[in-house]
Image (cartoon, rainbow, N blue to C red):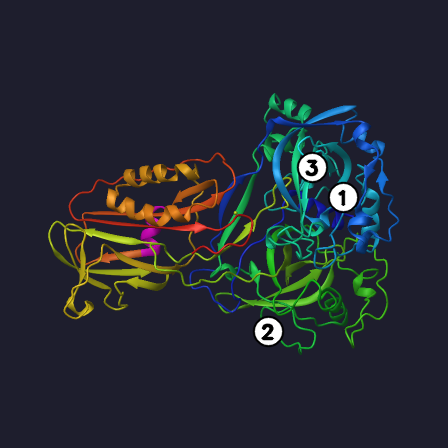
Amino acid sequence: MWSALILIVSSVLGFGAGSAGLIQNVNPYGSSPVQTVSYRACYDPQPNIRITLKWPDDFTNLSDNRAKDNPKVWGGANIPPTFATDASCEQIAMNGQAQRTYILVRRNTRIPSCKTDELNGPYGVGECPGWGDALGATAIHHRGTCSIDGYTDLRKIAEIPDPSTGQKDEVFWNPFSYNVGCNYKQDENCGPGDRRNLNLKDFVYVLRSRDAFDPDRLRSGCPVRWDSGATNGEACSHYFDVYMALDLYNAVQSAPATNDPESPYYFIRQVVQNCKEEDVFIPAATANLSIPPEFINTPFYPQNQPITYTTGKIIPNASDEKTNYLTYVWGRGDLINPFKTNLLQTNKESNTTPLNVCSGGSFSSMSIFSLAAGQPTVAPPTIAPLVNCYDPLGSIYFQDDKGAINSFKVYSKPATPQTFYLVKAGDNKTTYVYTLKEETAPSNQRHDTSLQLRVMDMITHNAWTWATPWCKPAIYMYPTKPTDMNVKLDVDGKLTLSKPAYVSNTGWNVKAYSDGTLQPFAADAAAGKPITYPYLYYEADINGISFPKDGWVVKQPDLENKLSEILEETGFNQKEIGDFMSYWLPRLQEKPYYFVGMLPENVINQKEHLTFSTQPDTLIRTRFVFEGMDGPMSITAPNVPHHDRVGFTVTDWGGTLVGKSCTDVSIK
């Protein structure tokens, strides 16, 4: 039962993914990649924005357009065009009340379409796994009920008039929140367990749009994914506004704070009110260096390729593993392309007992495919996908930074055919959970010459949260008198561009003047015509940088004033601030808010170490991290370092911009 239950729980609360890289690399700096976190609030109550549900008025004569909208899936299900919600919703969702008011707490929440009772629409590519078997049959009957039996999809229960459109809005409901059964431990995924504490029963979801049902949406033709979340930003999704019961909201305002997960207020006071969407940014260059890797590049063998020992590939050995491989991989050409499909680690689960390996009644014992031809030989049987057992697919091997080979057994489940589980040989304490990902690791692309570091390729892991389906340097020198300067740069990474040209053995050799003018030595200047520069400039690929957790969230129109204030307090002069603004402000226009963080100076000096032939009296360095945001949030502001410009002064500024939230990003 739990196998299928976690599918919707993961969508209603958040499902995401992690990191990238090539598995053959060996980490010279250690075995674990740097993982850092950026936070966004995901609970924003709006008490003045309300909807009211009335029983039974809003729960009867409801439209059910599934057969009309998506006949490919629902056309043969004999679904009546209208339905009435049963009394379970009066007692559970309405809490026994004839009328209940709800307030808006989240906007435009994304949930994979496969996790709703509508499944995927006609403009998606592929079909939701399991829709034709017992799981799909259950989904048909969940519309109009608040039952918590079986598959807990997000299902329609009501309709309310929308004064702005003159139409009726569709209202959906689901009872569960992420990891109810394991006290909300950060890295646990143990599920509702005994189904106590139905935390989302007092929330409803108002449908706003559906990718795969609307041919005019930008993602028409979206891929169908079950465990998609942040691992596939283009996956077919439904979008909902989330509302919380006003009576619960009012009760919580006076409820005592509690750290007891068994308290009826714990979920709201600790989980909801403190909720933040978490984007874990992992450097792509080092993301593969943990064992097992966060990202596994194309781990599946093509069906017609001989299977040989290769690190990073899932190798089936026993006959049942080959059968399962055929079923889960080769038999799902709509989901898996061995030449482009990757695996992305989304979670780690603690095991108290060994995995329950399937021994019969599962895919492993009734394959629907011919091993010889790889083609269906009989129609798919009605498989009970709720069996909580794991089908073995084979083993996968990784080499650690010391050259040792680490072996992991690979499993999947009938109920989660797009999810793969790795367990280390001889150590079954932890199961590593992976989901499919079509996008490869981001790669650096040459950009126009600028003052931005070409650094920190990352991909994003969006951590699970409640109701979440789951976000270059210029070196100035001002000696007190004209001075011949040799400047050497040692980066933890790779230098990719410099002006004037940086020579690996000798560095930069320039004459520096008190007004900041820099003139390369004669050998570096054009014949007969001296060249001057306002600063030394470079681009580099830098290995793992820890993103700051503290910073400022600034409205886009206020960025210039806030950044000028920070730079001036740090010690930069007006010319340097002007150069900074002329580069960065045009690049910070897309979002209404921006997170602004600063790397500590000791980190800058460690990652981009400068050596001067004449040591400056004052060295001022800063690196900004910018991230676009759709809304404001409260965050702790750091202390701004301050430097007085005394004597020979060197200043150095730079920055990086995080890409769109909740999708893979390349930071350049």
What is the CA distance from the residue labelled 1 to the residue labelled 2?
40 Å
Say whether residue 630 is magenta. Answer: no
Say whether residue 607 is magenta. Answer: yes
| Residue type marked 1 | Thr
According to the picture, the residue beneath numbered tag 3 turns out to be: 206
Residue span colored magenta: 600-608
Which x, y percent locates residue 231?
Answer: 60, 54
Q: Quadrant of residue 389?
A: bottom right
According to the picture, the residue beneath numbered tag 1 turns out to be: 152
In-front residue for pair 434/502:
502
Q: How many marks?
A: 3
In the picture, the quarter occupied by the C terminus is bottom left
What is the CA distance from the residue labelled 1 to the residue labelled 3?
17 Å
In-front residue for pair 128/123:
123
Name the residue at the bottom extreme.
Answer: 306
Mark 2 vs 3: CB contact within 8 A: no
Q: Is residue 337 above or below residue 53?
A: below
Which x, y percent locates residue 185?
Answer: 61, 42
Which x, y percent locates residue 527?
Answer: 16, 71
Name the residue at the front extreme.
Answer: 166
Task: Classify residue 49 as left or right of residue 457.
Answer: right
According to the picture, the residue beneath numbered tag 2 turns out to be: 310
Please name which of the two marks, 1 or 2, marks the residue nearer to the observer: 1
| Residue type marked 3 | Val
Name the residue at the top extreme.
Answer: 254
